[in-house]
Structures are given as structure tokens and as C-alpha cells.
Amino acid sequence: MSDDARQRIRGLTVPTGAEAVRGILLILSAYLVITGADVAVKWALPEVGVAVSMIARGVVGALAVLVITRGRGIAPVNRRLLAIRGVLHCGVSATWYWAWLSGMALVDSYAIAAAAPLLMTLLAIPMLGERVGWRRWTSTTLGFAGVLFMLQPGGDLWRSETAFLLVAVVAMAVTRIWTRVLSATDGPGAIAFWLMVAHVPMGVLLLPAFPPPAAIPGIWVILALVFFGVANAIAHILFARAFALAPVSALAPYEYSPLLIGGILGFLIWVEIPAWTTVGGAVIVIVAGLYNLHRERVRRAEERRDG
């Protein structure tokens, strides 16, 4: 990486309070959209399988990014990191789709994913040189305590897929960090577009393990896959913009937000009722995220007063 790129990354680690709040609002919007996409693919998976879902995400998502950006700003700059991030993210996607296809509840998978924020905060220190104050450490640690409460050994969340999802969570945290790194060289359109493209060959490679359906899916399944691809395109553009504006440590606690959204949608669609430990832990992690947003607003008010 060039010295200029390193300087730009260092500059990204010290945003203003206004930028941090904008980043938080963008990432909350992204999680709302991506949760809708997850619901769509979870509903379609029994009909089409993991590999076809990934191919659909890649094809439809890439086309959606092209339409949204009008083809501007998608030329890759940091090709190597875009490619590595894309492959790693595809592994995360395939693991999640397999877990849902195996019968894991949406809210349970999100509960496991809630381990990511602490990992993101920790990894941002050596990888990005971010400084994390005691208040952010407190909110992140509190959220992680809620995750531990949910993931009690021998509890309702422990099943055969859990160990694989925990490994995928580590990979997911790394891809989030790399999104921040890529924002120094590539725009949101390029970051989202090449991620979508990566899902096509990876999905093709998975076809022997997850064969396509024998018959053409029904119209509602096809529409669900189209929505799934478009929603992913929008969400990842928002993710890229959010990580360009705010430090990872400020955005990490909002990895918890799909817990609430996914829990509600999972109950309404599949009558998924989470265990009381999942609900209790979710309350803790949501409080942690709201506290972090409060601190960013306080910092923004202080900057306005001092400025």
C-alpha cells in the first residue's frame, strides 16, 4: 500500500462527531435492509439451496449496484484486498445459508453473530490504529457480556452449526475491518460491486455440494431472490459509506441491531420463539448500542460548542 493510502487510512480514524453520527445512521439503515434480505433468502433456501442463492445474490446484486451507481466509481483500485475480502465474505455467506437451511432460527444465528463487535473493536487497534476510549470499551464489553449470556454452553443456542458460525463470525469481523481499509482507496460502489461479483464464481464452485433444484422455482421464490440481491446491493453500499465515515469501534455495537429486527421477523414468519436467555442477552446488547449512540451525540455537541 502506498504512503498516501496509509495517510488516508490514518485520517479516517479520527472523524468528527457529525461524521460518526452519520456513519451510525447509515449502518443502522444497512442492517435494516440486510435483515430483510436475510429473511428473503432464508425463506427461499429450501427451494433453491445454498449455491443458487449465492449465484442469485451475485448476479442480481451486481446489476443493482450498476443501476444505483450508473456504473460510476466501480473500477477497482485495491484489487488484491477486494478479491481477498470477497472470497472470505463468500465463506461467511455460505456458512450462514447452510445454518439456516439446516433449521437454525434467524434470531439464534444473529445472537451468535453478536460476538463480532468486540472482535471488530479489538482488531481495529492493530489493523487500523484506532484509539478506543473507556466509554466505547464499556459499551462493547457490556454487549459482549450479553452475548456470553446467550451463548451459555449446553444452552439452547448450542447445536452442531454453532461452532461453524462462530468461526464465520471471526471472518466477518475481519471483512468489516477491511471495509474500513478499502474506504481509503475505493468508493462504496466498487466495494459493493466486487463483493457481489465474488458470489457468482464461489456459488458455482459450491454447486456439487449444494445441487440446484430439479425444477424451476415458483414465481414467489424468484421474486424473493431478486429482492435478496437488490437489498444486498443497497446494504453493502450503505455499509461501505458508513465505514468510510466512522471508526470501527463506533459502529461495532450496531452489529447487535439485527437481533431485534430478526427476532420480530422470525416470530412473525416462522413463529420462532427465542429462549429467555437469548431475549435477556439481546436486551443487554441493545442497551450497549444505544449508549454508544448517545456518546457520539454528546461528542458532536461538544465539538459544536468548542468550535
Image (cartoon, grey):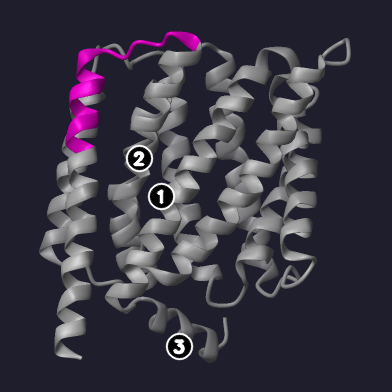
Q: Residues within 10 Å of mark 1 (few under 14, many from 20)?
A: many
Give the image location of residue 163, x and y in percent.
41, 25
Residue that numbered label 2 is attached to: 257
Residue that numbered label 3 is attached to: 7
| Left or right: 7 as drawn, with respect to 46 | left
What's under tag 3, amino acid-wise? Gln
- Residue sitting at 79 percent across and 65 percent down? 70
Quadrant in the picture for the C terminus: bottom left
Give the image location of residue 21, x and y in percent.
32, 65
Q: Do the residues labelled 1 and 2 touch (CB within 8 Å)?
A: yes
**Secondary structure beneath disc 2?**
helix
**Secondary structure beneath disc 3?**
helix
- Residue sitting at 16 percent across and 57 percent down? 137
User: Along the polypeptide, which appears first: circle 3 or circle 2?
Assistant: 3
Determine the residue located farthest toward the right in the rendered image.
215
Quadrant in the picture for the N terminus: bottom right
Query: Residue 127 has which mark?
Result: none
Q: How crowded is mark 2: few (under 14 residues within 10 Å), some or many (20 or more)?
A: many
What's under tag 1, amino acid-wise? Leu
Give the image location of residue 111, x and y in percent.
34, 29
User: Along the polypeptide, which appears first: circle 1 or circle 3?
Assistant: 3
Q: Quadrant of residue 222?
A: top right
What's under tag 2, amino acid-wise? Ser
Disc 3 or disc 2, which is closer to the eye?
2
- Residue sitting at 33 percent across and 16 percent down? 158
Residue that numbered label 1 is attached to: 28
**Secondary structure beneath disc 1?**
helix
For the residues labelled 1 and 3, the Cα–Cα distance comes to 28 Å
Q: Let me know if residue 272 is in the magenta part.
A: yes
Magenta residues span 270-285
